[in-house]
Image: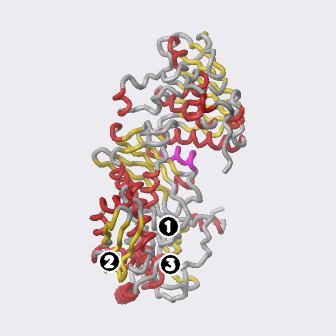
Amino acid sequence: MQTVDFGPGMKNRPIRQLDDKLINQIAAGEVVERPASLLKELLENCIDASASKIEIQVDRGGMKRIQVADNGFGIPRRQLTLALSRHATSKLAAAEDLFQVGTLGFRGEALPSIAAVSRLTLASRSPDQDRGYQVAVQGGHGISEPAPVAHRMGTTVEVQDLFYNTPARRKFLRTEKTEFNHCDQAVKKIALSQPTLEVVFMHDGKTVFHVLPAHTEEARKKRISSICGAQFSRQCVYLESQVETLALSGWTGLPTFSRAGRDLQYFYVNGRAVKDNLIAHAVRRAYHDVLYHGRHPAFILFLDIRPDLVDVNVHPAKSEVRFRESRLVHNYIYRTLHHTISELTPNDGKVSPPAPADIPLGTAHTGGHGRYPAQQNLRERVSEQLQGYDALVRGYRNQEAGPGGMSGHPLTGNDRDVPPLGYAIAQLKGIYILAENSEGLIMVDMHAAHERITYETLKAQARENGLNSQPLLVPVQINVSQSEARIAEDYMEEFENLGVEINRLGEEKLVIRSMPDLLSRSDVENLIRDTLSDLAEFGVSARIQDAQNEILSSVACHGSVRANRKLELAEMNSLLRQMEEVERSGQCNHGRPTWMSVSLAEIDKWFMRGR
């Protein structure tokens, strides 16, 4: 193994105090990773200064120049020099204030850290002054005396030649386009978190976007559309929930509006944009069985929590937080989102899912994920359910055909009380149901739709009947770490509630004696290891429930109405009515859309009617 040569005498060097210039450059390395990092810090200062308008100018992706101007309350002349000193802030006065932080910035490190690796100019005018004053600094030293300058109320910070005095760090910057994209994301995060803030963003002299203050729900939706795109605006639902010390609000995308990456995920804690594994895990769990494999949900969510219940001082860039009651927060976010998604049925007029363009919808359904073998008794249950389905259809056949209903007569524009998915009029290629509602045409993938109905029915039956546990023929012994063994002991009751009997044999050994019926032939060891890993990181785990649901999903797929099965109108209408009642009916168990709609106005455009 090759060793690193630190040079002669390195081991014998005495301990010494670092000089201020080096200290500032080290601090800058923690705060300023790239142009977008300093832009974020400057924008947060604008928000803390109660600005109602921010103007941002970025040149060459921020590597050449970044200028941020606001109309906030400004900085008095006598404090301009102090503002560029390390650990100088107006936002903290005592140690206890650190646990009641109500501002985005609070450390007093941003400006001096940025100044240490750039050429910075700070100009400001406070309400009690008839003119503005300006100071300049290069490389973190030699702050100039405040000089008079024409300036409106507020503050302007200009940063030029980032990392000019630390060329080694400049080499780590990416292309101008990449750095600009990061700057763009930083501005978007601020614009989304402050709906009443006017933001003007320019790059190389051209306007990227200009969003106006939004004081109404309609205006906020329009603002979101201009920042995140019209597609997200049209395919998201608003949610709002509050319990004691927690409140969650914002917009979450429909499951069928999924993304290849996490580029459209914004989460805020008390107005601060954060990335948190706990939150990410809760969101993933909420979307677990409604997203296409490998896809990611889109959302803009705001969590409000009492400041003393969250620690924002855990990351130099303030991009992470730590919750005092992490499990409570996790469960609250998961349940709120899960409930919102479960209520998305065709009765909600917002659910009109287009197929994501980059999902291979032409691929045939695979019939579940296939990780665990299905049990024979479950197959019998599905058969029974299909018999019940046929009985329901026979009931429909015996009913008198209503207008535009069983007889298949087309609806007129005057029909009222038409169900959201309308009435079936035909079947296409033995695969799709064509239906007519008051708006136009509905197309349903009958296998995908019935698969979701069957799956939700099986899950409901499992919840009602409880989890049947059976002893393993040969108990499974698992070697684990001491911490994992302690976790297994601490969560013994939770394991029992899930049908798992687990005992500790020694300091680093566990034995699994029984498992739920559905999982008796699964990979018990890996399932328990994954569960313990989740419990260690998040305090909760759904691995066992997910494994059972995966089997139910596979069984539901095999037991659902297959393609090329000819259905009568009564059978088709029966399926449509069930879809309107079942949770998550907008997508099958694999995340594919189950139905789509085309309005009459869109069809008219195809044939150029009215032109």
2 and 1 marks in contact (CB < 8 Å): no
| Mark 3 vs mark 2, CA separation in Å | 21 Å
Q: Is residue 215 magenta?
A: no
Compared to residue 317, the image places residue 254 above or below, namely below
Instruction: Give the extent of the magenta segment.
Output: 219-228
User: Which of the two discs, 2 and 1, labels the residue nearer the N terminus?
Assistant: 1
State whether residue 337 appears in this view: yes
| Mark 2 vs mark 1, CA separation in Å | 36 Å
Which kind of residue does numbered mark 2 sit on? Answer: Gln
Asked if residue 89 lies left or right of residue 168, the reply is: left
Q: Is residue 220 magenta?
A: yes
Which kind of residue does numbered mark 3 sit on? Answer: Gly
Specify the label residue 238 is tagged with. Answer: none
Specify the label residue 461 is tagged with. Answer: 2
Mark 1 secondary-structure assignment: loop
Q: Nearer the viewer, residue 476 or 266?
A: 476
User: Which of the two discs, 3 and 2, labels the residue nearer the N terminus?
Assistant: 3
Q: Residues within 10 Å of mark 3 (few under 14, many from 20)?
A: few
Q: Residue at x 29, y 64 (%)?
A: 492
State whether residue 400 appears in this view: no
| Mark 1 vs mark 3, CA separation in Å | 39 Å
- Determine which residue is flagged by label 1: 439
Provide residue 29's location: percent of width, then percent of height: 59, 34
Q: Nearer the viewer, residue 460 or 205?
A: 460
- Determine which residue is flagged by label 3: 370
Q: Residue at x 57, y 59 (%)?
A: 259
User: Which of the two discs, 1 and 3, labels the residue nearer the N terminus?
Assistant: 3
